[in-house]
Amino acid sequence: MPTPLIRAAWRAPLMVVAAAAAAGFAALAVAVAGGASTSFDTWMFRELDAHVGNGATGPLLALSWPGISIALMALVAVVAARRRRWDVALLAVLAPGLTMLLTEVVFKPLLDRQFVIDGSTFSGVFPSGHEAAVASCSLVLAIVAYQLPIGRRLRNGVLAVLGVWTVVAALGLVRNFWHYATDTIGAIFLSGAVVLAVVFAIDSTSGAVRSQHREAASAGPR
């Protein structure tokens, strides 16, 4: 039987992380619901406009193109299915899918945050859907990295790349005036809470199945 997505030693600490991410999202959602820019958002716009040139805006925005996340998750799901790692395949489909569903269908309409730029107002920008796709995809890939037979140095390199992708994609969205910085932070919080919750649910279900198989094997033929 396959190993759990999260080892037992990491389960309790990551439950704390998931709870903290959920609490961070809730606090931020309450703070920005129905409103517009915060002082932090204004400061981020000013700093990025001053330090990131116009020539970099296109490449930065491209990092949050949803097609990248979709292609990566599809690849993970297909490879996992071929290797009969149905838990990994389910994670690649369900975790980002649920994150995006909550983002686009539940929280954006519910919180109705306003984005005001050049005299135009746009509604429903919190949390950022583009950043939610990147962050949830990155978290899934980080979990998958711990399932692969690779060395610690390579695994740490993968995690570093995923972290940089998540942060730089968020900065690109802000620099291109697609979102406030707090929209992207909220998306990262939400992604952390949802992806880890899905992992725990999959591991719990898989654990129950493994226990049933062990009990059936120990009972032997009747």
Image (cartoon, helix red, strand yellow):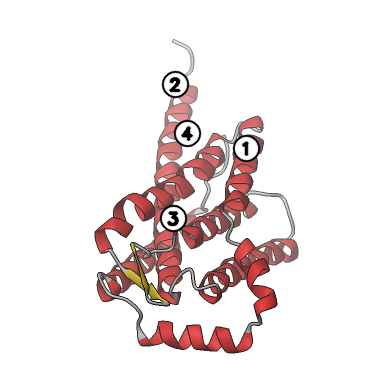
Q: Residues within 10 Å of mark 4 (few under 14, many from 20)?
A: some
Circle 1/circle 3 CB separation < 8 Å: no
The amino acid at mark 2 is: Ala
Q: Is residue 32 left or right of residue 138?
A: left
Q: CA distance from mark 4 to mark 3?
A: 21 Å
Going 28% across and 56% down the picture, which residue do you hit? Answer: 109
Residue pointed to by mark 3: 196
Q: CA distance from mark 2 to mark 3?
A: 34 Å
Q: Residues within 10 Å of mark 1 (few under 14, many from 20)?
A: some
Going 28% across and 63% down the picture, which residue do you hit? Answer: 112
Dot placed on the residue nearer the N-terminal end, 1 or 3: 1
Please tell me whether mark 4 sits on a helix, a strand or a loop.
helix
Going 58% across and 51% down the picture, which residue do you hit? Answer: 69
Residue pointed to by mark 2: 219
The amino acid at mark 4 is: Arg
The amino acid at mark 3 is: Leu
Q: Residues within 10 Å of mark 3 (few under 14, many from 20)?
A: many
Residue pointed to by mark 1: 80
Q: CA distance from mark 1 to mark 3?
A: 19 Å
